[in-house]
Amino acid sequence: MEKPISPNYDVVICGAGPAGLVAGLKLRELFPANFTIALLDKRSPWREPAQCAEAVHNKGLHRLVQVNPDWIRSPIDGVIFVSPEGTRIKYSQPQSGLLINRTLMHKDLAQRCSNSNIDCCFSANVKSISILADGVRTLSCLFKEEGERQIKARYIIDASGAGASLTCESNLAKGDFDVEPAIFALVKGLKFETNFIQMFFGQKIAPGGYAWLFPRDSEIANLGIVCGREYLKTKSPRKYFNEWLKKEFPEAEVISVHGGPIACGQSFEPIAKDHLFKAGDSADMVNPISRGGILEAMKAGKLAAECIYKIEDSDSKTDQQKIYDYYFKHWMKIQGGVHDRLARAKPAFGKIPDVVLNKAARKIAAIPTEKRTLFRIFWETLVSSPGLLFKMRSLMH
Ligand SMILES: Cc1cc2nc3c(=O)[nH]c(=O)nc-3n(C[C@H](O)[C@H](O)[C@H](O)COP(=O)(O)OP(=O)(O)OC[C@H]3O[C@@H](n4cnc5c(N)ncnc54)[C@H](O)[C@@H]3O)c2cc1C
């Protein structure tokens, strides 16, 4: 599927994660075959395991890409919320989510890119990007086989992930907004329902975040933890993780341990200028509470491609600036606005005392399962502490 990379392209996409792959496919849908596109990554995007818990919204994924059933490990039929003292609240919503095999999805989407005449190279480390006249940019790229060389591009999509800071010199969003280190292990030896994800809350478990059990198949689970950054000054995420694992799942047999950064917030720095678009984690586009960013990255990749199409169709520099503004504004409308409100509520959310969560969980446990709604679960938690409602007021408008 990989091809030799030419010295010139109309668009070069840096990063073949969800943002870059969907951007490539959308570009090819919009432009004819003679519009040249390259998709570069420093590593094969289907290396195992993906640094991810691999949960997505079912309808959301289907809206963004043509889903191959092989990508689906299991449907998600609901969530089990676990309170600090261990009360388990089962919330059912059949088929609402999917646990996917991201590496298979990446491979399939990369194959589709290659089939639609996009030059793919997955051993190309983009070292720097500089700007020439009229928005044309040069990428300095280190290829595994041939060493360093330059590529020119009329447009660049930086989809290089969290904190990769490939294009930080341009005063754009850097993918470093509220970066939290997440850690997870693939484990066996546990019994769990394959169609329910489990989320564990508590100040001693994962302050400012949550711990999770997401099934991979009937034998293997992905157990992980993400904590708010401010809680990691005195204790490492690894320590939180080990303590939780030992207490909650002493029988777990750890197969391997992994980790990765999550840029979870909504920055207000520009995300596009001078023929350069940032998409996905590289533009701080992750949900600050769930820490989900796969569909967000896909949405942004698609939107970046549409904006390049608009620029190609425009006449003047003024129109171009309007399109860069549109990229940010439209992102805020479809997703970023919600992220911003969640980000403002996040500090209060992270500080909910265990006694409040325990009290709310006991109350919700008394509600019959079929009458539990996400809103009711959330509401019961909020009203369990009088000050919380005020602190989370950003969620109300
Ligand atoms: C532990 C963990 C669990 C998560 N769980 C979930 C989940 O369950 N659901 C969910 O929706 N989200 C989850 N996320 C977040 C999700 O993984 C990211 O939001 C998503 O991958 C962002 O996609 P992206 O395309 O922007 O970036 P990435 O997927 O990070 O892709 C970026 C690509 O760019 C490449 N790259 C970087 N620098 C260069 C360079 N200089 N040159 C060439 N290539 C480069 C990288 O190799 C990579 O392939 C999780 C994240 C972590 C860390």
Image (spheres, rainbow, N blue to C red):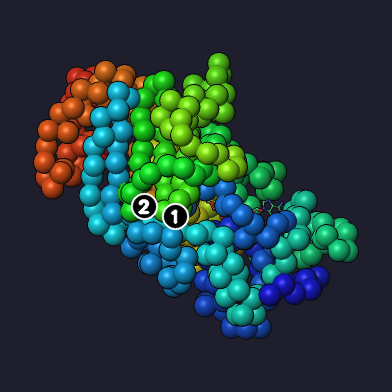
Q: Name the residue under label 1.
A: 217
- The local crowd at label 1, few if under 14, some if 14 to 19, many if 20 or more residues have their Cα within 10 Å, is some
The residue nearer to you, when weighing 386 against 313, is 386
Judge left or right: residue 353 versus residue 101. left
Q: Look at the image and tell me whether residue 318 can be seen.
A: no
As drawn, the residue found furthest toward the bottom would be 33
**3D distance between C-alphas at marks 1 and 2:** 7 Å
Judge left or right: residue 81 versus residue 289. left
Q: Check the image and report above or below for 140 versus 338.
A: below
Q: Mark 2 points at which residue?
A: 194
**Residue 150 coordinates in the image, percent (x, y):** 83, 62
Tell me if label 1 and label 2 are in contact, CB under 8 Å.
yes
Secondary structure under badge 1? Answer: loop
Q: Which residue is drawn at 30% across and 37% down?
A: 81
- Quarter of the image that includes the N terminus: bottom right
- Could you say which quadrant of the image residue 340 lies in? top left
What amino acid does circle 2 point to?
A: Thr
* Disc number placed over residue 68 in the picture, else none: none
Q: Residue at x 60, y 74 (%)?
A: 111
Judge left or right: residue 27 versus residue 63. right
Q: Check the image and report above or below for 19 versus 224.
A: below
**Residue 56 coordinates in the image, percent (x, y):** 40, 55
